[in-house]
Amino acid sequence: MAKSEKREKRKAGGGLLPKLAILVVLVAIGVQLRALHLQVQEAQAERDALAQQVQVQQRENDALAEDIAEGNSEEKMKELAREELGLVDPNQRVFSVTN
């Protein structure tokens, strides 16, 4: 009976190889989960950056739409000439300060 008890004990406890295989599979799954988690974090950061860019672009679009709605006024034309072209009125003095 001693031999049959040893065989049953060996079968019930399982061998080292199946346990090792299960451990390897679990480690591989853990590594894959960590990699996926990092990818999700990167995607979320990219989404946040893109959302911020969309907000900035939306504000610019709203300002342009406002300008279009106002139409061409003389004051608006003068403002554009000053800002974009550096032009001044005939009676206006411009001082350039450089260091």
Image: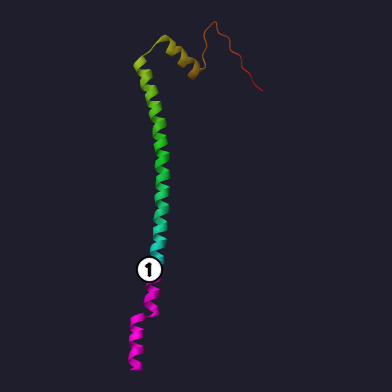
Q: Position of residue 59 (x, y in %)?
A: 40, 27
Does residue 88 appear left or right of residue 18 in this picture? right
Q: Give yes or no for residue 5 being in the magenta stretch.
A: yes
Q: Nearer the viewer, residue 94 or 26?
A: 26
Which residue bears the numbered disc 1?
25
Segment colored magenta: 1-23
Q: Give yes or no for residue 28 being in the magenta stretch.
A: no
Q: Nearer the viewer, residue 19 or 53?
A: 19
Magenta span: predominant SS is helix
* Element type where label 1 sits in the image: helix
Q: Position of residue 41 (x, y in %)?
A: 42, 49
Q: Position of residue 53 (x, y in %)?
A: 41, 35
Q: Nearer the viewer, residue 14 or 26?
A: 14
Q: Find residue 15 and report its image quarter.
A: bottom left
User: What's the residue at 39%, 11% (across, down)?
Assistant: 73
When the figure is inspected, residue 32 is found, relative to residue 8, above or below; the finding is: above
When the figure is inspected, residue 36 is found, relative to residue 68, above or below; the finding is: below
The count of marks equals 1
Q: Find residue 14 and report its image quarter.
A: bottom left
When the figure is inspected, residue 85 is found, relative to residue 59, above or below; the finding is: above
Does residue 70 appear left or right of residue 85 in this picture? left
**Which quarter shows the C terminus?**
top right
Task: Spot the residue most to the top.
Answer: 91
Q: Position of residue 52 (x, y in %)?
A: 42, 35
When the figure is inspected, residue 4 is found, relative to residue 63, above or below; the finding is: below
Neighbour tally class for label 1: few under 14, some 14-19, many 20 plus, Cα within 10 Å: few
Q: Amino acid at mark 1?
A: Val
